[in-house]
């Protein structure tokens, strides 16, 4: 394998480590909310440092590969996609951190009414995150397009939750604080789904050289 | 000027056009909320298409420059920063769109109690956005660092607004809907400030080759 080939392989390996750390932190943050699990929330906070460190390593490596070699076509698109996917993964890590912090806040708050099915939404989002990463690993544009197609379902669930939680606050003012925290969690889950969509779009671009962004961006939240 | 030099200049020009479109849409979206200005909100929606189109043009040009030339050092960092700044600008455009949609929703909702000073927060955020773009144009890392330093102030204001609006919902259930819409606007403004911070960090990296990310990321929301 050429040195350039080794460099690309290292970039792929580091992105996989990054995505696996982020995915674990997302799972932990969801467990923290759903099971009121303080230990899981603290694990998210502890692992944040490694995610931030590896983000910088990936960017540095991508830039080095661009500088020392003259990548063309697929290799070039791979490196550009790696730079963009890296940014999305790091921001997903930040969102997991936010969910974990909300979870800790919710533990000290009276239980919220069980009017919205957080585990169900979390499961959908988790599947999207997992598929977006798998589509990158397997260079599978069809799988990536599935992720892009799922985004609307999550947006609709978010809108439905918003209505339910608003009604629940109006019912009893004691619900306001826990319902707002749940709303924050739902919004954050939806933003995670949006990042998974961004990654999937980058995968389609990297594998097929086709830009699928803005086919539906007007309805997308960043 | 070499062809490569001309390409870099075109990339800079296109980024400036992009940032100017995004900045105008942010200003319009804020006006739409603050002055309940339906025309401004609709202008934001109309201009979204051009922002999405130019995002794709900028990415394509950056990749072409990487493919056809072998940029080193500052030029390479400039192109990588352009790719990242482009993504942030496009997502800022999406956020302006969200604010404009909230504004339209607020016009049809009974007036919210004037408990939070949206124009003040909007002014701070607008200054951050403007400075982040100016720091890129002027290649001024000191100005960029000012933006990074301002981010905490916006985060604190967001937290304060959250408390005020929660109390206001508890006071009178008729406040719940308008207060939630205002909360969405405040959150979105805070996310705009975060993107301005991301751009400023990319400018420091591009001009000085120093990575200033993660000095304070644990408190940052994406």
Image (tube, coloured by chain):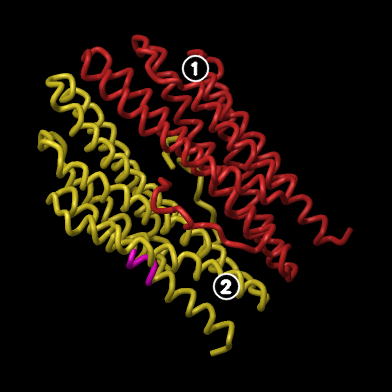
Chain colours: A red, B yellow
Q: Which residue is mark 1?
A: A34
Which secondary structure type mostly characterizes the magenta part of the structure? helix
**Residue B18 magenta:** yes
Picture quadrant where residue A44 is located: top right
Q: Callout 1: residue from which chain? A: A
Determine the residue positioned at 48% across, 56% down.
Answer: A215
Say if B94 sits above or below B86 in the image. Answer: above
Indicate left or right for A215 with B197 as reference: right
The residue segment tinted magenta is B17-21
Q: Which residue is mark 2?
A: B75
* Outermost residue toward the bottom in this view: B1
Image coordinates for residue B196, horizontal then vertical, percent: 38, 54
Work out how far the residue at label 2 is from the one at label 1, CA to CA, in angstroms. Answer: 48 Å
Indicate left or right for A133 with B116 as reference: right
* Outermost residue toward the right in this view: A1
Visible residue check, residue B138: no
Visible residue check, residue B185: yes
């Amino acid at each position: 394998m050429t040195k350039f080939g080794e460099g690309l392989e290292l970039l792929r390996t580091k992105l996989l480590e990054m995505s696996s750390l982020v995915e674990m932190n997302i799972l932990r943050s969801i467990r923290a909310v759903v099971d009121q699990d303080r230990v899981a929330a603290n694990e998210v906070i502890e692992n944040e440092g490694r995610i931030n460190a590896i983000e910088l390593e990936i960017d540095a490596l991508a830039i080095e590969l661009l500088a020392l070699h003259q990548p063309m076509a697929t290799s070039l698109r791979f490196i550009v996609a790696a730079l963009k996917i890296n940014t999305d993964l790091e921001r997903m890590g930040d969102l997991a951190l936010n969910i974990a912090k909300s979870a800790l806040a919710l533990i000290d708050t009276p239980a919220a009414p069980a009017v919205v099915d957080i585990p169900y939404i979390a499961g959908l989002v988790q599947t999207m995150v997992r598929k977006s990463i798998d589509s990158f690993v397997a260079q599978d544009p069809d799988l990536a397009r599935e992720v892009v197609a799922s985004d609307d379902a999550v947006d609709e669930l978010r809108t439905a939750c918003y209505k339910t939680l608003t009604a629940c606050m109006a019912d009893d003012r004691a619900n306001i604080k826990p319902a707002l925290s749940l709303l924050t969690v739902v919004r954050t889950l939806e933003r995670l789904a949006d990042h998974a969509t961004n990654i999937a779009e980058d995968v389609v671009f990297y594998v097929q050289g086709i830009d699928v962004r803005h086919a539906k961006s007007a309805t997308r939240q960043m």
